[in-house]
Image: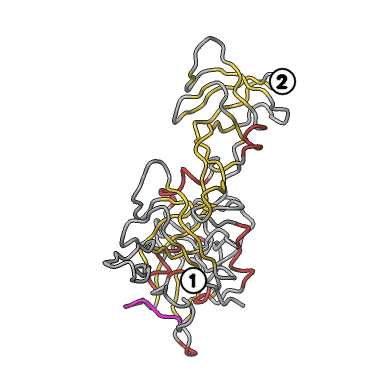
Amino acid sequence: MAGSALADELKLAENAPDSYTVVKGDTLWGISGKFLKQPWRWPEIWQLNKEEIKNPHWIYPGDVIVLDRTGGKPRLRLLKNAKADGRGGSGKLSPRVRISSLDGDATPSIALSSIEPFLYKPMIMDAATFKAAPRIAAGPDNRVLYTQGDQIYAVNMPEAESGETWQVFRQGKDIMNPDNPKEVLGMQVNYLGDVRVSKVGDVTTLQVRSVVREIQIGDRMVKAPEKTFLNYAPHLPAQAITGKVASTYGEVVDVGSLMTVAINKGALDGVDVGTVFFTYKAPRAITKEDRSEPDLLTPPIKNANLFIYRVFPNLSYGLVLDSTQPVNVGDLIKAEAANAE
């Protein structure tokens, strides 16, 4: 595979602008690509330290990003939109850090339209957690399936409060580790819809608010999480990580740009939101004409970048970017180690 991504000096993109005014619809990945040949090196060109990389980066439409080429090493600086920022003038700043859970005006890391269905819905669960989750136990009649507007009943909801929204899901397939086919990385669960708590008790009354698939007796629930805004900088991990693509979403076999895959590395391996991997086609065996010939494999060929946007202990979900060939289960993934101070 390619050598360290950080072995070379920071390389600017061809025709990198001296300045760029952020517009609605931009992403941090796209902005980084306007200035850098390697968009995942965003922390370097902003000269961010390890702690700053962990924080969200708040950049807004109207802000001006200036490329400073002085001093022998390029860096970016931010001129805040004074009118939108409520300040009397423009200051030269790094991307701001805010204590905020949701800011719809800020520039997201990647295209939210491609990942929004996956950001706030239950996706991975272990068998014990699934079994212990609140359960849809009955309806008001003998129907098997229930949909929007129906009233249903659930048990095992001692912490529920009237008016809350809960998400309904159903057991899906196990995601296996490509490096160890007997190891279950997690159980995928399929989101079905939202319900609203009407009355709390030993048997809790629920109103079905929306469905993407009809709800049935035995389906489980989790409380709907607070939405958080995804605007973490693309970056490399502190230590190099290698692994494989473990699963695609749905029945898709060949995955292209702006589609989701799961990998067999997670928080326990040092992956966090914003980590960028490179994916490579899995090597294939070279056909031999004689048994005496050595076993050889084709060299790995890079076929995409992968931006991680949701992390679990043993696996992560990422958005495929800049693919040149389809990404498939079993393809290799590699993230070089960063050199942030």
- Residue beneath the point at 44% across and 78% down: 67
Dot 1 crowding, Cα within 10 Å, few <14, some 14–19, many 20+: many
| Magenta segment main secondary structure | loop
Residue 22: image location, x then y, percent: 42, 64
Secondary structure type for disc 1: helix
Secondary structure type for disc 2: loop
Residue 73 left/right relative to 292:
right
Residue 24: image location, x then y, percent: 40, 57
Task: State how many labels appear.
Answer: 2
Q: Answer whether residue 335 is magenta in the image.
A: no
111 vs 19, nearest the viewer? 111
The part of the image, by quadrant, that contains residue 133 is top right
Amino acid on which disc 1 is placed: Trp
In this picture, is 212 found above or below 330?
above
Residue 75 left/right relative to 339:
left
65 vs 16, nearest the viewer? 16
Dot 2 crowding, Cα within 10 Å, few <14, some 14–19, many 20+: some
185 vs 212, nearest the viewer? 185
Q: Which residue is mark 1?
A: 42
Q: Which residue is mark 2?
A: 201
In this picture, is 212 found above or below 123?
above
- Residue beneath the point at 62% across and 71% down: 50
- Residue beneath the point at 42% across and 73% down: 1
Residue 250: image location, x then y, percent: 41, 41
Rounded to the nearest whole Å, what is the CA distance between mark 1 and mark 2? Answer: 51 Å
Residue 185 in view of the camera:
no
Q: Disc 1, disc 2: CB below 8 Å?
A: no
Amino acid on which disc 2 is placed: Gly
Magenta residues (range):
10-16
Residue 184 left/right relative to 107:
right
Q: Residue furthest top?
A: 141
